[in-house]
Amino acid sequence: MEKIAKDKLKYGKNICLSAAVMFSATVLSVCVFSYLKGLDGADVIRNTVMSGIGVFTVLLFMAQAKAGSLFEYDNGEHMLRFMAVYLICLAFAFAIAYLPAAGWPYLAVFVFLTLFSNLQIGICAGTILLAVSILLSGNGAEIFILYFVCGFAGASLFKGLNEAYKIGIPVAVSLMFLLTGETACVVLYANETLKPELFLIPLINVIACLVLLLIILRVFSALVIYKHRNKYMEINDQEYTLLVELKEKSKKEYYQAVHTAHFCERISQTLSLDVNASKTGGYYRRIGILRGENTWEVVSEIAAEHAFPPEAVRILREFLDKTVPIRQKETVVLLMSDAVINSILQVKKNEKPDYDKIIETIFKRKMESGVLKDCIVTMEELNWMKTIFKEGKLYYDFLH
């Protein structure tokens, strides 16, 4: 408990430090660069005030995301990492203001900010930095609209990358949007006869964005996507210490955990969710019984001692802590898998179960209970889950 308290204190300090640095760096640097660009006093004040309001909005969204567990991946636990990403992009925004408007690689900036936060924060931060470049360079609204729309589209396309790491379509589509937008907003408005030379800077921009995106995605995969791969391989091994202890204490609980993890893995693969985190939830949703009580407090201590990845911890908390709403789709998968396996095993003690009826009843009760009201899971995804459970009839026959 003392370690958890220290971690919370350290995290709180990191949040305060990130907020202070991001706000002061933005406001002061915008003020200085506006002055160095030779803008008059009114423009300097305008740029400084508007950038301050903008970065404050970003910080507000960050606070809301933390309170509601809305950060993607483990970004909510790494405020200093996002601060570093933001400061790199801030410096980029000042440098870009000195380049021709047709060559601004803002698509990469929006994607960079989104991958290390979430879509809302990434779009907001990217928009503020784009506005800074526009104000310093004196470009018009058409350039702002061009890069805002392309940045929004690109960030949306890259949202939710998982270990399948399918980046081909997002990269191709986002670059196509950029080239199309550049043609509509830059090339066609050049007031010159249409000729190949007009496409030179837009094409250079597309190539620059491609290179930057590949670099960003490489960094992202190393720091986030595959960061916990080895840890997941360790704790999701049925010979891992905790699972061996669980089997020794209660074979019934152990085999239920194995069956639950099986469906968590299968459904998460089908829905392109975080397979490893979901599987961990299946194995360890009742690991607290090793210490006599399966509460969130007990499970969180075990998870901390064994360095469970943050996404797995979040799923376990949403599943066990009744004060925390269920928001993650992986938690819904765990909730349904646990309920289906437990119900079928209970019914099998006395009679041959009607599997379809049990599954339909479980889904109906969970949906009517309101437990899913805060989750972004769709009816289509719930129907996919239901279908996968119903396809497991032969598997259920061997449950014990």
Image (spheres, grey):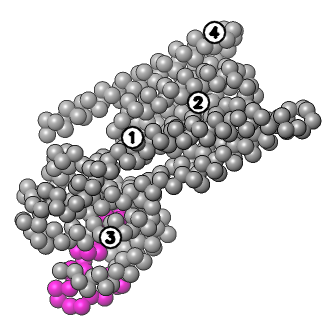
Q: Residue at x 57, y 53 (%)?
A: 168
Secondary structure predominantly adopted by residues drawn in magenta: helix
> Where does the C terminus fall, quadrant-wise?
bottom left
Q: Tell me, yes or no, whether the two marked residues, 4 and 3, touch with CB atoms within 8 Å.
A: no
- Classed neighbour count for the residue bearing mark 2: other residues with Cα under 10 Å, few (<14), some (14–19), many (≥20): many
Q: Earlier in the sequence, mark 1 or mark 2?
A: 2
Instruction: Answer with left or right where residue 93 lies relative to residue 195.
Output: left
Magenta stretch containing residue 285, yes or no? no
**Amino acid type, mark 4:** Tyr
**Of residues 160 and 346, the one drawn nearer to the viewer in this rendering:** 160
Question: CA–CA distance between discs 3 and 2?
Answer: 43 Å
Identify the residue position indicated by label 1 in the image: 223
Q: Quadrant of residue 350?
A: bottom left
The tag earlier along the polypeptide, 1 or 4, is: 4
Mark sitting on residue 35: 4
User: Disc 1 and disc 2: Cα gap in Å?
Assistant: 25 Å
Numbered badge on residue 128: 2
Using the image, tell me which numbered label, if any, was put on residue 263. Answer: 3
